Image (cartoon, helix red, strand yellow):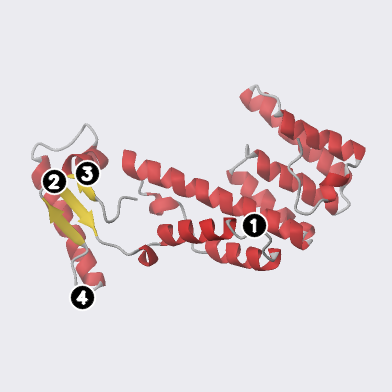
Amino acid sequence: MNYRKVVPTGSLIEELWGGRHPARVENALQAHVSRWRRRLAAMEPEAARPRLVTHPAGYQLMVDDDELDAAVLVDRLDRIRGQHGADPRQTAVELRGLLGLWRGPALGGLAWGPITRAAAHRLEELRIGAWELLFDAELRNGSHQQIISEIQEVLVRHSFNERFWQQFIVALYRSGRQVDALNVYRQLRRRLTEELGLEPSPAMRYYERAILEQDPRLNADPPAVLT
């Protein structure tokens, strides 16, 4: 998001109305800004500074990093990614807390124009990355049985994310469910061919072979990405 940056008036007009803006679009934008200011003032009646600042070229939203969930998410996720060799149990706790910041779709589902759509997409990619890190941490914890249902739920929303399928297969395999793990791979292959006309990637195909050969890397710590 472009907080603390001056967003040009033209960008805001494009964001709100696209190519179908009203006749007096500048006045309409000023009316929107006035409403936003009133709402922000009502939320912080004793604020020492205005949140929405007018500039000759546009408007600037004044928000500190620790006041914006999205900024907190980015900062904490970067820190977790940099903690090589950290206790996987603590990593899992931190990631669950981080994912708990997420309530509903990115930006509350209010991604109207190019700026907010791009921001919502970036945030969703970060959320996916956090889930991937969480499942890796839980597999290192030996919590493979406990995360099977969680991975299934995430796959409902991200049905073609190969890393989630790989983690699903590993969790099933480590739970003594070799046949189920093999069936999961075949389910993915069938969906790819029927819905997208594609075959699984070479990396994904290694998981089928690894199951059949009982490859010890399926029990490796950290969970191996087979190639």
Q: Residues within 10 Å of mark 1 (few under 14, many from 20)?
A: many
At x 74%, y 47%, the residue is 168
Vertical placement of 35 versus 214: above or below? below
Task: Give the x, y percent position of residue 26.
Answer: 10, 43
At x 26%, y 41%, the residue is 15
Task: Give the x, y percent position of residue 25.
Answer: 12, 41
Task: Give the x, y percent position of residue 13.
Answer: 20, 41
Q: Position of 31 compared to 148: left or right?
A: left
Task: Give the x, y percent position of residue 87.
Answer: 69, 66
Q: Name which quarter of the figure residue 89 lies in.
A: bottom right
Quick one: label 4 or label 3, which is nearer the N terminus? 3
- For mark 4, what is the residue? 45
Report the mark closest to the observer, 1 or 3: 1
Report the mark closest to the observer, 3 or 2: 2
- For mark 3, what is the residue? 12
| Towards the viewer: 168 or 193 | 168
Label 2: state its secondary structure.
loop
In the rendering, which numbered label is found on residue 221?
none
**What's under tag 2, amino acid-wise?**
Ala
